[in-house]
Amino acid sequence: MFNLFQTYTFDLLSIVFYCLLIFIPLLLGVVLALYADRKIWAAVQKRKGPNVVGPFGLLQVPADGLKFIFKEIILPDGSDKTVFLVAPIITLALSIAAWAVVPVQAGVVLANINVGILYIFAISSLGVYGILMAGWSSNSKYPFFGALRSAAQMVSYEVSIGFVIVTVLMCVGSLNLTEIVMAQKNIWFFIPLFPMFIVFFISALAETNRPPFDLPEAESELVAGYQTEYSGMPFVLFMFGEYINILLMCAMTTILFLGGWLPPVDIFPLNELPGFVWFLLKVTLVFYMFAMVKAFVPRYRYDQLMRLGWKVFLPLSLLAVVMTSSILFFFNLAPGM
Amino acid sequence: MTISLLTFYLFSAVILLSSLMVISAKNPVHSVLFLILSFLNAAGIFVILHAEFLAMILIIVYVGAVAVLFLFVVMMLDIKSSISKENILQYMPIGLLVGLVFIAELVIVLINTKLDLTSIQILSNPMSNFVGQSNTEAIGSVLYTNYILYFQLSGIILLVAMIGSIVLTLREREGVKRQIISEQLERRGKIDLVDVKSGEGIDV
């Protein structure tokens, strides 16, 4: 047993170190994303947004976080206490776990596994459990309705996300995220696969329960959906999990369609910038689009949401899979042929 | 004692415990949650066996889709968690029968399987023909060539099952108003959008 510890202590410590290297920038990213979200939203509505706490209101989000941490954690009387407290932990843990395989630069990734994209897809399909458990264990009507809506919505849009990923994978010939980025050296996939880029972006909005698809927490109908009974720290965990998921979807859009860490054109001043700067810039751009959509698109009605998912996106992405594979096959463009 | 052995014992212990909890938990929702936990750990064992593609597919299909629907239905059922002892006695013989049949089948299979040297070699090195390929490629290269017929057949069976369940549950109700978006967009002639200048009003 002692030998075991001796052999693996170094590995263990280095893994912990790398995890922190992912986790701390991620937390910083969430804080900035929350701030940017509120600022952009405010700017569209000609308000000022957070501008009191700290310079330009930058400390507003940490202040809110502190406020939540010091609030009392209220456990509803009729709730299933264990499931109630496990749900936010699962949501946050899963959203962080997915980042283990995201490459921010050539070779800079915690786990360069060869089924990277499937891993992210699997983890994000698990995300629905946090919401379902929260909604059920609250033992209250509105959280339950919110959870049911959310589960149906996430399962529906996962299907079209899956097909979009398949079209990209056919052009790459590998499930490894690094190779997906390297396959875009000549042309970023959002140009040849533009319709799929749009489908993926909208499905990503639905998958992360962002407006205009934020029906699970539509405040005019469901108070706050599955989060209604949560307060204090568990609520913060939900909030963080949600925003880390949003950032993950931005990173996925970047990796699948916008060429990851590759510069737009491979010429002198642009390719001198380190890869992760390009990656961050692209993620920021996608997040800006997410925030703008939140600001100026009204909320969908539930049946319209389901219609869009099943009757528009599913046939469209299925058609795209057939079309892409036929084109790749008949023009001998498929990788490895 | 290597790490992979330790993780194997960890995963299998969790699988056994959570499977036990599936049948002993009083609350059916807890049962489903434990079932999901055991699925996840089974995926972990696949990863230890270097079958990462199967592991991910297990999570995506079973945990991400099938078990969600399971949980969905069980949550909606509103079963009161107290089940009286009469019920247990009532269903005990059937349960025992099913269990016995299952054990007998396993025993028959195990007796008839000859674990000779070649099968042990195949088991210990399942991808000997596919050196240097990831197991996604390996599975794809057999599934779409040697086993294409079975693959397509299973797809057709699933399709038939799907159509069957849709036909069984479909019912046309009269007097239900539906939004037909294409019709809405076509009625331009009947409804006009008019830019009304302020202070002037408009004749209707």
Image: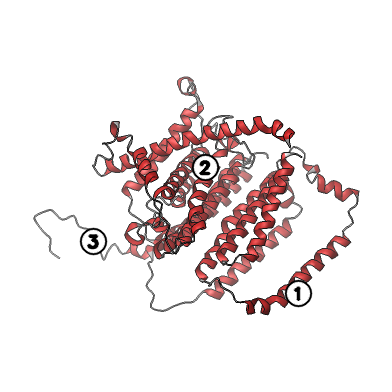
Rendered position, A232 above or below A3? below
Q: Chain of mark 3?
A: B
Displayed quadrant of residue B5: top right
* Disc 2, SS: helix
Q: Chain of mark 2?
A: A
**Numbered label attached to residue B192:** 3
Amino acid beneath label 3: Asp
The number of numbered discs placed on residues in the rendered structure image is 3
Amino acid beneath label 1: Leu
Q: Are marks 3 and 1 on the same chain?
A: yes
Disc 2 from disc 3: Cα separation: 51 Å
Q: Can residue A109 be seen at all in this image of the molecule?
A: no
Q: Position of residue A81 (x, y in %)?
A: 49, 58
Q: Is residue A299 left or right of residue B162?
A: left
Residue under the image location 53 percent in, 55 percent down: A159
Q: Which residue is mark 2?
A: A96
Task: Name the quarter where the N terminus of chain B is drawn.
Answer: top right
* Disc 1, SS: helix
Residue under the image location 84 percent in, 64 percent down: B107
Amino acid beneath label 2: Ile
Residue under the image location 56 percent in, 39 percent down: A100
Disc 3 from disc 1: Cα separation: 72 Å
